[in-house]
Amino acid sequence: MRTPSLNAMMLRMAAALVLSVATVATVAAAQTPWKPEKNVEIVVGLTAGSSQDRTARFLQNLWQSKSIVGVPVNITNRVGGAGNIAWAYLSTHTADAHWFQISSPTILTNHIIGSAPFTFTDYTPLALLGNQYIGVAVRADSPLKSVREIVERLRANPAALSMATNSQGSYLHIVCAQIARASGMDARRMKLAIFQGGELMTAALGGHVDAIATVTSNLLPHVQSGKLRLLGISSAKRLSGVLAAVPTLKEQGVDIVIANWQGAVGPAKLNAAQIAYWDGVFARSVKTDEWRADQEANLWESDYLNAADFTRFLKADYDQAKAIFVELGLAK
C-alpha cells in the first residue's frame, strides 16, 4: 500500500482546518442577531387612504414614536395589477429584510384565479396582524334596504344592479360573488366594477354603482356621517358597538362568513435571524396600548400570528379559498 507523502498529509490537514473554520463561521453567522442597517421600506399595493395603507402608516408612526425599529421607516405605494405590481417590486429584494409588504388574501386568491403566477410560497410570511369583516353598503338615499333585497332584484333581473369592490379575486370579490350566487345567477355574469383605494368610495358616494363591498373600517366613517348605509356584514354573528344593529349576510340568505385579514410578508429567502428580528418587532408592537386602541377603533379582531404560525395559516387559508373559488366557477 502506498504511504501518503508528508506534503500530502499536511495539505489534507490544512484543508480540514479550513473546512472546520468555515463551518464554525457559518454557525456563528446564523446565530448572530440581525437588525436593520438602513431604512426599512413598507410596500403597499393600494393607494393612500386604503386599509392596507392605513396599517402601514400606523406601523410607521408606532415604530418611530416607540423606537421599536431603530432606523427610519418609509412607505411606498406600488399600485396596479390587482396588487401584482407591488409583489413584483418586492421580488426584486430577495433575501433583504429591509423590505416587507402589507398583504391581504389577494396573495392567495390572485394565484387561484390565475391573475398572478406567484403566491405566498414565493415570499417569506412574517406576521398575521388581524382580521376584519366585509360590509355591503349603499348610498344613504338608495332604495335598497337590505342585502336580501339585492338578491331578489338580481334574481328577477341579473342586470338589475351593479356592485363594486376594491380588487378582483379578493375575499371582497367572494362576498359579491356569493350574493350573485344566492340569487341563482352565475357569479361571472354579475355587473362588478373594480376600483382602487379611495376610488371605490368616490363611485359609491357619487351614485355610479348601486352597492359596494369592502372592509368595515373603510365604510365606518361614511356610515357615521350619514352618507352610506350598511346593509350586511360577513361575520358569523352580529358585531357589537356601533355596528350592533347591522344583520349578517347569513341572516339575509347569503351563505358566507369570511374575514379579510392583513399580514406582513417579506421577500423570498429571508434567513432565520432576519425572521427572528421581525418576530420580535411585531410581538412587541401588538402589546402596545396604541395597537389595541387602533384595532378597536377600526373594528379589527386582533389575531397576531408569528412567522411560523402565519405560514401554516396561509397554507390552510389557500386551500379553503381555492375550494370556494372552484365552487363559484372562478378558479383557473
Image (cartoon, rainbow, N blue to C red):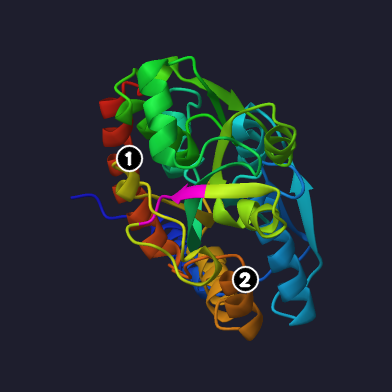
Say the numbered circle drawn on residue 297.
2
Helix, strand or loop at label 1? It is loop
Judge whether 16 appears above or below 202 on screen.
below
* Earlier residue among tags 2 and 1: 1
Residue 200, visible in the rendered structure: yes
Which residue has dot 1 on it? Answer: 254
Depth check: 149 or 293 in front?
149
Q: In the rendered image, is residue 122 in sight?
A: no
Left or right: residue 203 compared with residue 130? right
Q: Position of residue 284 (x, y in %)?
A: 57, 80
- Camera-side residue: 152 or 180? 152
The residue located at (75%, 81%) in the rendering is 67
Crowd band around label 1 with a 10 angstrom C-alpha radius: few (<14), some (14–19), many (20+): many
Instruction: Indicate which disc residue 85 carries.
Output: none
The residue sitting at 53% across, 55% down in the picture is 262
Quarter holding residue 202: top right
Rendering quarter of residue 113: top left
Q: Which residues are magenta?
A: 231-235
Say which of marks 2 and 1 sits in front.
1
Instruction: Tell me: residue 148, above or below residue 246.
Output: above
Between marks 2 and 1, how big is the CA–CA gap? 27 Å
**Dominant SS type (magenta):** strand
Residue toward you, 166 or 94: 166
Judge by depth and name the residue closer to the eye, 291 or 99. 291
Image x and y of residue 226, in percent: 69, 54
Q: The residue tagged with tag 2: helix, strand or loop? A: helix
Left or right position of 170 against 77: left
Mark 2 residue type: Ala
Give coordinates of residue 273: x percent, y percent.
Answer: 53, 68
Q: Looking at the rendering, in which quadrant would you find the C terminus?
A: top left
